[in-house]
Image (cartoon, helix red, strand yellow):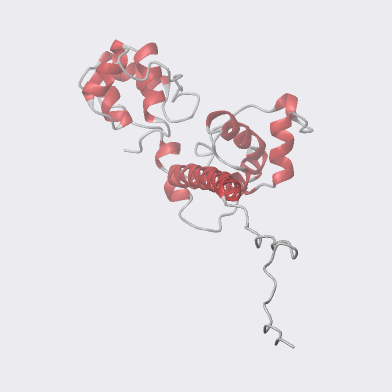
Amino acid sequence: MTAPLMPKATAVWLVENTTLTFKQIADFCELHELEIQAIADGDIAYNILGVSPVSNGQLSMEEIKRCEADEKAVLVATPLEKNVKERNAKAKKVLSPTQRAEKPNAVLWIIRNCPEVIDSQICKLIGTTKPTIASIREGTHSNMANLRPVNPMAVGLCSEKDLEKAMLISQQQAELKENKAKRKKGGKSKAAKAVADAPKKRGRPAKENVDEAPKKRGRPKKDA
């Protein structure tokens, strides 16, 4: 089974909007049954916004209703979601006109649902350009009024593994940049402290006054 992109957020939505058993939700989200019970009790994931697997194309309402009627039934993801990895197995894939048209919608979905993914990773995932991403972020895209978030995995633009990898890389780059900034700031402060604490260079002691110096004694004059 292919687990949803955001298992806990999906589990929150299923707990709040369906009558599925904890086991059914746990099996679909690949989580522990006790963890689903904790979500229902509000002990964990209380600050996570639920994400609908129906709108993401990972489940159908018919499948949810089927499992609600039978507690022993197991949720089965939609064929489109299950076959995403197979469709993206080839590095170079030919996109259909529909897939190309869904690129801006997929970019909007990533920006809203995975804000930590940086633009360079979005370019690799969707096959778009940075100016396009910037226009969608700023709301200046030519077709902005008609854009709607679409899960890129549901339309075959990327796989779940690729998206998770992009999220991980973006997170690592953000941490690396933050650590570098901290080291740079710390290095400057240490250098300033070292300069402040350094003793001033001592000069040579001033020479004694010539008049005060003892005169050189000569030989005593002989008596006449």
Q: Residue at x 56, y 55 (%)?
A: 93
Say which residue appears at 62% left-offset and 53% top-offset.
200
- In terms of image quadrants, where is residue 132? top right
Give the answer, above or below, for where 43 lies relative to 103. Answer: above
Q: Position of residue 63 (x, y in %)?
A: 36, 23
Residue 120 drawn at (x, y percent): 62, 48
Q: Quadrant of the C terminus?
A: bottom right
73 vs 7, left or right, is: left
Residue at 66% x, 47% y: name it: 128
223 left or right of 53 in image: right
Residue 21 in sight from this viewpoint: no
**198 shown above or below 56:** below
Name the residue located 60 percent from the left edge and 47 percent from the top edge: 188
User: Quick one: 73 or 192, which is closer to the camera?
Assistant: 192
Q: Kindly tell me whether residue 36 is visible in this rendering.
A: yes
For the residue pair 132 and 19, the one nearer the viewer reads as: 132
Instruction: Give the image location of residue 102, x and y in percent.
Output: 63, 37
Classify residue 6 as left or right of residue 166.
left
- Quarter location, residue 2: top left
Q: Is residue 34 left or right of residue 68?
A: left
Q: Position of residue 140 (x, y in %)?
A: 78, 31
The residue positioned farthest toward the front in the image shown: 224
Quarter of the picture containing the N terminus is: top left
Q: How many marks?
A: 0
